[in-house]
Amino acid sequence: MSTLLATSRSSRAPVTASAIQAVDHTIALFSRIPHSAIALLARFSVAMTFWMSGQTKIEGLVLDPIGATVEFGWPRISDSALELFRSEYALPLIPPEFAAPMAAVAEHVFPLLLLVGLASRLSAFALLVMTLVIQIFVYPSAFATHGLWAALMLYLMARGPGRVSLDHLVARRVRA
């Protein structure tokens, strides 16, 4: 009986060692994913999410990169956006006539800056604050979605936008 146990234990050791090597190899491969690629995907994802939300708040200018729709005109706050800020999106202390345009501007300016990688950390921070406001006052049950957004923005704030960004070009010129 003890010989059988010793045999099964010794045959398990090489399997365990090879499994550990496979895990180590996989981790090494994952660690080679460039920060710039992760940051670019994070910037694009967050920017598109907020840009498309901003597009729902305005009329007169449509730039929908996902639906490939373009309409040029002077942007203005839509009546439906004002109504949403009077009801579903109502914020304490901020009147809807101020909150709706403020949100629409923020949802266009900061995503654009984030997409091109200019003032990326500041833009990510501004959108994180906006996300916290939405989480606390508008959709408190949407933590799963807002948590994902927050994780991406915190990553960008902590690690920066990566090499494929105007921030990187500016930093290189300033340091040169």
Image (cartoon, grey):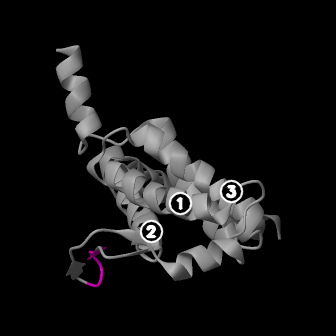
* Other residues around mark 3 within 10 Å, as few (<14) / some (14–19) / many (≥20): some
Q: Residue at x 46, y 65 (%)?
A: 50
* Residue with the mark numbered 1: 103
Query: Is 57 on the left-hand or right-hand side of 149?
Result: left
Q: Residues within 10 Å of mark 1 (few under 14, many from 20)?
A: some
Q: Does the magenta stretch include residue 109?
A: no
Distance of label 2 from label 1 (alpha carbons): 7 Å
Q: Earlier in the sequence, mark 1 or mark 3?
A: 1
SS at mark 1 in the image: helix
Number of marks drawn: 3
The stretch in magenta equals 62-67
Choose top left, top right, bottom left or bottom right for residue 6. Answer: bottom right
Q: Position of residue 173 (x, y in %)?
A: 17, 22
Q: Horizontal placement of 86 versus 34: left or right?
A: right
Looking at numbered disc 1 in the image, what kind of residue is underneath it? Ala
| Dot in front, 1 or 3 | 1
Amino acid type shown at disc 2: Gly
Measured from the top left, where is residue 29 in percent x and y? 36, 53
| Disc sitting over residue 19 in the figure | none
According to the picture, the residue beneath numbered tag 3 turns out to be 133
- Measured in 3D between alpha carbons, the distance from the residue under mark 1 to the one under mark 3, in whole angstroms, is 11 Å
